[in-house]
Amino acid sequence: MLLQQLFERQRSQPVQSARAGGMFQDLQYPILHERPGSQPGTTEKFNLSFRDKSGFNGSSSEAFLNKAGNGSKWNGLRLDHGPNAKSNGQTNWHWNQKGAKNAFGRADHAVASPMTAKAASALKAVKPAARGAMIVGAGMDAFSIGKEANQSMQTGEWDNTINRTAHVAGGWAGAYAGAKGLGALGAGLGSLVAPGIGTMIGGALGGFVGGMAGYMGGSSLADWATGNL
């Protein structure tokens, strides 16, 4: 019974909402306003991702600002941790860019500031934890649907399974929409404050908060629609 109570607490809506917020690091966020282009007088669109979009073998990057519409050839700005060719091979946090110097004001191999390095280190630690939490949350929701379905097979009453499935589907759909929306907004606002690192921090925070709020709102809406509130 104690284990059952612990499980019920762990799959409560607030806890599952926090886990769903972990999807922020698997999404891509369009930056809402254009940045200065590589050629004078031009502008270009960028997006933010926390997954490697550069195709660079052995990338040590934790965040990528990708120039939109470049097909398979990567152009943009990324934040790396490793040997730096312009600091005598010393290992440090530094920027690598291709065609994005005007957009974000970062030269290739430029050493990151101490504050940026701390933020990047935190992001490096948070990403795998967030991904693990999201997987656990999805697994617990899948288990809860299976549990309801097993009960329904025994009783012949399927309303409980339908309600639980709607709750879970609404939660994850809301988490995705919320993370995408607030992540894009956060990346845009961050770009106004501190292009580059501000874009990344704003996108990460916005995506996480949006995912949490979206799961909570989407699951509550599904409960209301099924009369389960």
Image (cartoon, rainbow, N blue to C red):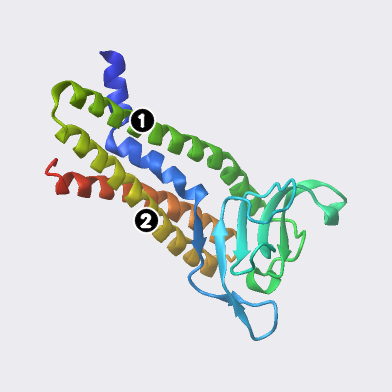
Q: In the depicted view, which residue is nearer to us: 161 or 32?
A: 161
Q: Position of residue 207 (x, y in %)?
A: 44, 53
Q: In the depicted view, which residue is nearer to us: 79 or 132?
A: 132
Classify the position of the C terminus by image quarter: top left
Among all residues in the image, which is located at the extreme right? 88
Does residue 146 sit above or below 214 in this rendering? above
Mark 2 vs mark 1: which is more N-terminal?
Answer: 1
Report the side of 19 relative to 60 (left or right): left
Image marks 2 and 1: residues in contact by CB distance under 8 Å: no
Q: Residue at x 18, y 44 (%)?
A: 223
The residue carrying mark 1 is 140
Label 2: how many residues lie within 10 Å, few (<14), some (14-19) or many (20+)? some
Classify the position of the N terminus by image quarter: top left
Q: Residue at x 68, y 74 (%)?
A: 102
Among all residues in the image, which is located at the extreme bottom? 41
Q: Position of residue 136 (x, y in %)?
A: 43, 32
The residue carrying mark 2 is 177
The three-letter code of the residue at mark 1 reads Met
Q: Position of residue 154 (x, y in %)?
A: 18, 20
Report the side of 148 relative to 117 (left or right): left
